[in-house]
Each structure stands twice: as structure tokens, then as C-alpha cells.
Image (tube, coloured by chain):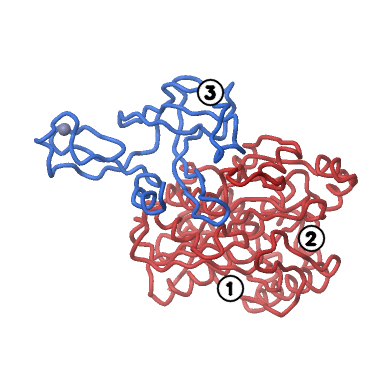
Amino acid sequence: MTTARFWRDNATRYNLMATRCGSCGKVTFPPRHVCPICHRRSMGKMEKFRLSGKGEVYSFTLVHEAPAAFELQKPYIVAMIKMDEGVMMTAQLSDCEYAEVKIGMRVKATLRKIGEEGAGGVIHYGYKFVPE
Amino acid sequence: MNVGIVSYGAYIPRFRIVPPEIGRVWGSDGEAMSKGLMIFSKSVPGPDEDVITISVEAARNMMRRTSTSPKEIGALYVGSESHPYAVKPSGTIVAEAIEASPHLTVADLEFACKAGTAGIQMCMGLVGSGMVKYGVAIGADTSQGAPGDPLEYSASAGGAAYLIGSQDLIATINGTYSYTTDTPDFWRREGQPYPSHGGRFTGEPAYFKHVSACAKGMMERMGTKPEDYQYAVFHQPNGKFPTRVAKMLGFTDKQIEVGLITPHIGNTYSGAVPLGLAAILDVAKPNDRIFAVAYGSGAGCDGFDITVTENISHFKLDAAPTIQQLIERKKMIDYATYAKYRRKIMMKEGGS
Ligand SMILES: [Zn+2]
């Protein structure tokens, strides 16, 4: 991914900036221009909405075969998180052991390094989840 | 105008390594090292943590404890000697992550272990002059010692953030005084991964001389004596130095006990006095008076005289973890894992 494309999503990746439909109230993450329920009726009514960062583990798995960028962290946990606002997110679960993770476990978002473009390149930061 | 602390927050990575484990690898007496330095374990950042993530976590914990709007923050400084970028300020990312951007001034500061307290002084000046309503000063580090170097037993990771303002203060900063000279006790040249130090030279003419001079100068200016303070915190590169300097100055072990956290987490460099002060504020009562002296190699000291206000009794301490909770949240690792996390193992390009 290019530096510019990452940068454009900073508010989303740092602060979980989502969108809420001004017509039906549905929250969407990542942010959308159009509500998946109201479609055209939501046009121009999508508002910025900051997720609380809190939610619970919906499902999870342990990744053993990691891409090169995650080599130092393997094995690591990837989880589907059901946020308190109702949206589902997929992210790495950090600061806990695989054996401790349970479905329904309360978690909160934190900012971590999620990659870098080589030793001389830009560092990417984004959300991961940790036990609450 | 009164200037002081409106809120604060801290963060310490959860990994720990003990001195005997480091000694085992290098054929040194880790037990003796632990006793000599008064360090029983040190914190280690995870592979996905650095000064920016530690600063963000500390700053977010600080914001969780206050109803201050981040948009009212007019200045933000991150003091560290391990900024992830040589050029590209850590503070820009921290400001964005607490939604303080874009109407504020930001800079990264560097003065060995006292860059965080230098930030507090800069915020005091900006708030006191009315240039900004609130300023944020962060001290954080993920420092490294070369493999096998005695520094490896102490260099650790952590940080704390302070919201400086003039209203709703939980603690008033009564005064600050600095003492600075040109003393080459510890340094790191651009591009070098590990610092160099003057060995024994780091003690007497560096740490002890500067901390004593700054402490005495501070008390002289305030017209105070050691017994006027409930708590004192000194820069803590290990457990021994602050204990000895406190005794030299006439402070008791009881006064420094709460703020002395290096024995549990190691030397967090720019994070050291900010974290020690946070440990004190976690338990302080209205009217408690706190004495703080940060030391940075090179060399200089920043002294602070602080009085806790009535506001501390309704401060939202529980909205973020206390220092004690951060110290207790830990996972022990062996030297191999430590070496991997700290990238002391040569890897093929692309690993991170
Ligand atoms: Zn809708």
C-alpha cells in the first residue's frame, strides 16, 4: 500500500472514525459514503462518528504462517470484534495469550505499529485490540 | 497566574526480563548486577510498540481522566532519545491520535533522560504567558544498551504524559529551576544504534553533581528544606543512584519510596521522572508537597516544586490504569525473545 493511501485513512486507523447514517442511524466501519440500508436516501446524510473503541471478541484464530511484515510477532491472534456500536471489525489481538482468549471477552482498541515500508520507509500505525 | 498539572496518564509495556537471565547469556553475574543496580526486572517493548505508541497510550490515558477538549490543546511536546524517526516528529502522530490536530504547535524534544521535563517547563511558559490554554508534555523512551554492555541490565521502556494548564489544577507547580553544564558522560552519535558512556564518569561528576546542585538551587529559591516535602522523586537510571542522592541531600527513604519505580521496570530514560511523579500523584492527598529532579546526560537537571490541590480528591484516577497496575501487568520473557523483540538478531530484509 502506498504512503499516501495509508495517510488518507489515518483518522480511521488511529481513532476508529466511522460513519453514521443520518436517515436510519446505522453505523458503518470503515466509513462509507452511502448507507447499505437506505442507499440513495442516505446521500449527503452520512455523518462522521467516532467508535468508543470497546467491544467483545466474536471469533478468533491463531496465525502461524505470517506474512514477512509480521514475522517477529508470530504466532499471533486475529479476532473478529463486535464493537459496542454494533459494527464488526477484524484486527490483531495483542497483549494476551491464545489460551486466555474467549468468545465474548471484553476488549478495547489501542494504537500499535502495524507495519513499515522497510528500514528506511514510513512506519504505519493503526488499531489493534487488547483485553479491557 | 497559577500553572500546574490538570491531568496525567502513563503507559508501561507488559514484557519484563530479569537481570540473571541477561547475565546467563553473557557469562556475567546477573544476581550481583541486580543487587548492585537495585533493578529486579526491566520492561521491554513488544515488537509492535515504540515511543510513538507508548506516547499515544500515555496521552490517551491522560485525556480519559479529564473533560478537557483536545481541541483546546495549543502545544504538544514529546521528549525522548528513541524517537522512531530521525526526521518526522513523533508528536504529529500523537496529536492526531488524541484529536488535538491541527490547531496547535508540536515539536519533538531531546535531552537524554530529561526531555520530558523540559517539555513540562516549555508548557508552563506557554500557559503562564497566556499563549496557549493547555499544553501537553510527554516523556517516553524505548532505550537500548549494546548487547553485553552493563546498560543492557537497565535500559527499558515506558512513558507518561502531562496536561499543563492554569485552571482546575490537581497540582500547582510552585516553581522550576534548571542546572546545566557541558559534561560528556553519555552520548549517541547520529546513525549509531547504541549509546556510549563514560563508565564510572557517569556517577560523581555527572549524575550526583548535577542532581545535588539542582536540588539545592531549587530549595534555596523556594526557601524550603527536605522535611517540607511529603514525597521526592529523582531521576532513576537504577535504584542505587536516587537512593544515594536522596540521602546526601537529607531526604528519607520514606519520602522517595513511592516514586522509585526503576527497581521494578528499569530505567525508562525520558519516562523516568514523569512515571515516578505519576506514581506519587496516584496516591497523593490535598496539600502534599512534592519535590522532583530530572537528570539528563550531557548534562543537566530540571527541578520542580509541586503542591497537590483539593481537586485531586475528585480526579478521575480510575479512568486509566495507575502506575501500580501497570507495574503488576507483566509477562516475563527470556533473553532470546528479548533479543528478537529488540531486533538484536540480524534478519532478512522485510521482517518487522
Ligand atoms: Zn441508513
Up-down relation of residue A71 to residue B314 (above or below): above
Instruction: Specify the subunit that label 1 lies on.
Output: B
Within 10 Å of disc 1 (Cα), the crowding (few <14, some 14-19, many 20+) is many
* View extreme (front): residue: B348
Up-down relation of residue A5 to residue B229 (above or below): above
Left or right of residue B41, residue A108 in this image:
left
Residue at (67, 60) in percent of width and height: B233
Q: CA distance from mark 1 to mark 2?
A: 22 Å
Q: Identify the element where label 3 is drawn.
A: loop
- Percent across and percent down for residue A19 are 25, 40
Query: Answer yes or no: do the residues labelled 2 and 3 have beta carbons within 8 Å?
Result: no
- Discs 3 and 1 carry the same chain letter: no
Q: Quadrant of ligand 1?
A: top left
Give the mark nearest the N terminus, 1 or 2.
Answer: 1
Q: Which residue is mark 2?
A: B241
The hue used for chain B is red
Q: Which residue is mark 3?
A: A101
Within 10 Å of disc 3 (Cα), the crowding (few <14, some 14-19, many 20+) is some
Left or right of residue B234, residue B106 in this image:
left
Q: Which residue is mark 1?
A: B176
* View extreme (left): residue: A41
Instruction: Specify the subunit that label 2 lies on.
Output: B
Classify residue A56 by image quadrant.
Answer: top left
Query: What chain is colored blue?
Result: A
The front one of B336 and A108 is B336
